[in-house]
Amino acid sequence: MRGLFLAGAFLLAAPALAHDFQAGELVIVHPTSRATPGGAKVGAGYLTIRNTTSSDDRLVRIESAVADRIQVHASTNENGVARMREMANGLPLPANSEVTLKAGGDHIMFVDLKQPLKAGDKIAATLVFEHAGQVEVTFNVEPLGGAKAGASEHAH
Amino acid sequence: MEQRQGRQSMPTEMRALRALRIGLWLLVALAGVGAAVLLLVSSGNPPQLQARAKLDPSFEAIDQNGRRVTERTFQGKPSAWFFGFTHCPDVCPTTLQQLTTSLDQLGEDAKKLTVVFVTVDPERDTPAILKEYMESFHPSIVALSPSAKDLNAIVKGFAAYYAKVPQTEGYTMEHSSLVILRAADGTFAGTIDQHEQAETARAKLQRLGRG
C-alpha cells in the first residue's frame, strides 16, 4: 500500500519536476528562477513554503553567492500599474498556511547579479528562518519564457 | 358653499403634499445616483483613455542601436507601447517575453506593427544597456531611452504612469504595466493586460496590425 502511495505521489510530482526541501517542519517547494535578459542586473526567484505547524514563522534572510543582495518583494500588478515594495522584515509564514511567491506576484529579487542566470543553471542558496533554522536549497533556472515556453525562446 | 370649498380644498392640499413627497423622494434617488457616479469616477485609478483619443506626444529619444528617433518615426503605422525598466525582475521580462512569443507566432503580420519598449529609468538604462537587454527578445522591438523631459512627454501623451520609489539601497520604479495599442492614425486602440491569455494578446496585436 505504502509503495503504491509513494508511486502515485511520484507520478503526480514528476510532470512539474518539483524539488522540495525541508527546514524543521517547514517544506520549501520547488524553488525556481528565470533566465535573465542580456546584461540584466536583477533576477527573480519563486517558491512555495508550507507551514503545517501551529506556530508562525518567518523567512528572515536569503543568502547566495549569485547576487550582492537578495530581497523579498511584495508586488502588485493592478489597475494597469506594477508596484514593488521590499519586505524589510522578511516574509511572514503564518501557522497552518502556505505562502507562494510566483511570477506576476510577490517574488524574491536577486539584486546586482554576479553573472547572468542561464536556463538549466542551479543557484545554491541558504534560506534562514526565524524559528525553523536554516536550509540549503537550489533554485532551478528556467527559460525566460517559463518552463513551458522554453522551445520558443530566442537564441541570438 | 364655504363647506364645499373646504371639502374641495382638502384633496387639493393632499395632492400638493403627495406631489411634494414624491418630489423629495426623487431628489433622494437623484442624490444616490449622483453619489454612485462620483464614486465610480473618483476611484483613484490612473487616467483612463477614451476610445479614439489621440496618442501623439512630441518627443525625441535614442533607440537601442544609437539612432535618434522622434514621434515621426512611429507615425502612420500601428504600434504597441510598453513602459518598463531593466532593473525589473518580474513584470518587464515577462511582458517582453510575451510580446516576443506573440510576434514570433504572428509571422508576416508582425511586420505590420511596431512594438516599442520605453524605459522609465533612463538614468540607468542607456541605449547600450538596452541593446544588450533587447537581444534576449524579438529583434523587431524598438527600445527607447529618452531624456527625463522627453520621457515625461511620452508618458503624458500615452496617459501612462511611472514613479521612482526609494529603497533601503538604491531605488525601484513603479510603472504602467499595460501594453498600450495605437492605431496607424495615432488613436488609442486598446490595451493588453499581462493577466490576459496569450491567444487574446496575440489576436489583439494581429487585429491592430491589420488595421
Image (spheres, coloured by chain):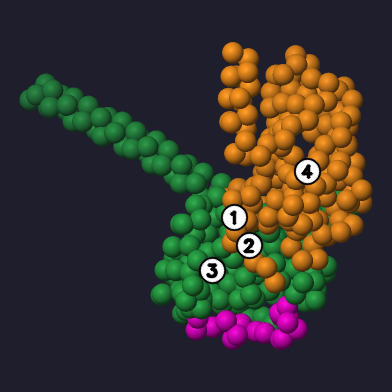
Chain colours: A orange, B green
Residue A46 in the image: x percent, y percent?
A: 72, 42
- Which of the labelled discs sits on residue A153, or is there none? 2
- Which of the labelled discs sits on residue B34, or is there none? none
Question: Which residue is drawn at the image coordinates 15% and 24% (left, top)?
Answer: B6
Q: Which quarter shows the C terminus of chain A?
A: bottom right
Residue for badge 4? A139
Reply above or below: A76 against A119. above
Residue B14 in the image: x percent, y percent?
A: 22, 27
Frontmost residue, A104 versus A149: A149
Q: Are marks 4 and 1 on the same chain?
A: yes
Q: Are marks 2 and 1 in contact (CB under 8 Å)?
A: yes
Residue for badge 1? A149
Name the kind of residue labelled 1 in the image.
Ala
Question: Which residue is drawn at the image coordinates 46% and 57% (left, top)?
Answer: B199
Name the kind of residue labelled 3 in the image.
Leu
Residue B77 in the image: x percent, y percent?
A: 50, 81
Reply above or below: A140 against B84. above
Question: What whole-number distance in Å separates the C-alpha atoms at marks 2 and 1?
Answer: 7 Å
- Is-magenta flag for residue A104? no
- Is-magenta flag for residue B71? yes
Question: Which residue is drawn at the image coordinates 89% and 29% (left, top)?
Answer: A134
